Amino acid sequence: MNKTIANYIKKNFLEIAIISVVTFVALILRLLLLKNYGDLWLDELYSWYFASQKTIFETVFELLKQDLHMPLYFIILHFWLRIFGNSDISMHLCTMALTIPLVPLSFYVVKKIFNKSAAYFSILALTINAFCIYYSIEVRFYGLVVVLALLSAFFFVKMLENFEKKYITGFIISHGLLLYTFSITPILTFCYGLVGG
């Protein structure tokens, strides 16, 4: 396995170097926004409230009682707060940790489905787009939704091309996590059913 990874790195060194640099730039831009972000706004305070319950069961119970959102992001944030504290910066960093992998991930997904030129364009757009930068640190679940939706769509496309176990498993996991992150995911599930049916 190590030999396979070493061979891949050697063969694709320039590509990996470019992706690493772009991901680093994306990280810097998000940290700059974080430095100048200001106070949490109302929805972010709701995220803090739900995640700061004593147990994950209380977090889920409060969500069911007061909101219509699915619990995965709030459960992750709950454990993050236990480990790193409940400061504003800590909560922003939680979302950033969940979303910064979107840059390299989008490169490989777009490259597999389309081509390398489209992949480079996608990571450039994700890196410098103000909308993407903002939602990658906001203390809400939207950034995680994009990561999981990208994975879900990728595995769905690959499953249509080749109904292999690895793609089926990837789809079940990524789409299952998406269902537990965003309450309107069943609409996407229905669309998948129309396309694949």
Image (cartoon, grey):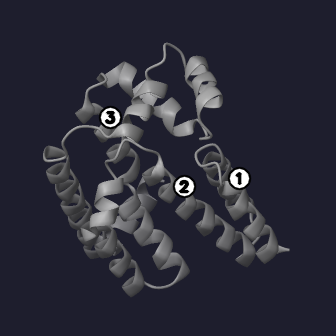
- Per the rendering, the mark at residue 190 is none
Residue that mark 1 sits on: 172
In percent of width and height, residue 95 lies at: 37, 43
Q: Secondary structure at mark 3?
A: helix
Residue that mark 3 sits on: 91
Vertical order, 40 against 2 (above or below)? above
Vertical order, 50 against 188 (above or below)? above
In percent of width and height, residue 62 lies at: 58, 24
Residue that mark 2 sits on: 148
Amino acid carrying label 2: it is: Leu
* Residue at left offset 41%, top offset 40%: 43
* Residue at left offset 28%, top offset 69%: 129
Residue 139 lies in quadrant: top left
Q: Secondary structure at mark 2?
A: helix
For the residue pair 87 and 152, the one nearer the viewer reads as 87
Q: Nearer the viewer, mark 1 or mark 2?
A: 2
The C terminus: image quadrant: bottom right
Mark 2 packing: few (<14 Cα in 10 Å), some, or many (20+)? many
Q: CA distance from mark 3 to mark 2?
A: 20 Å
Marks 3 and 1 close (CB-CB < 8 Å): no
Amino acid carrying label 1: it is: Ile
Residue 125 lies in quadrant: bottom left
Vertical order, 102 against 96 (above or below)? below
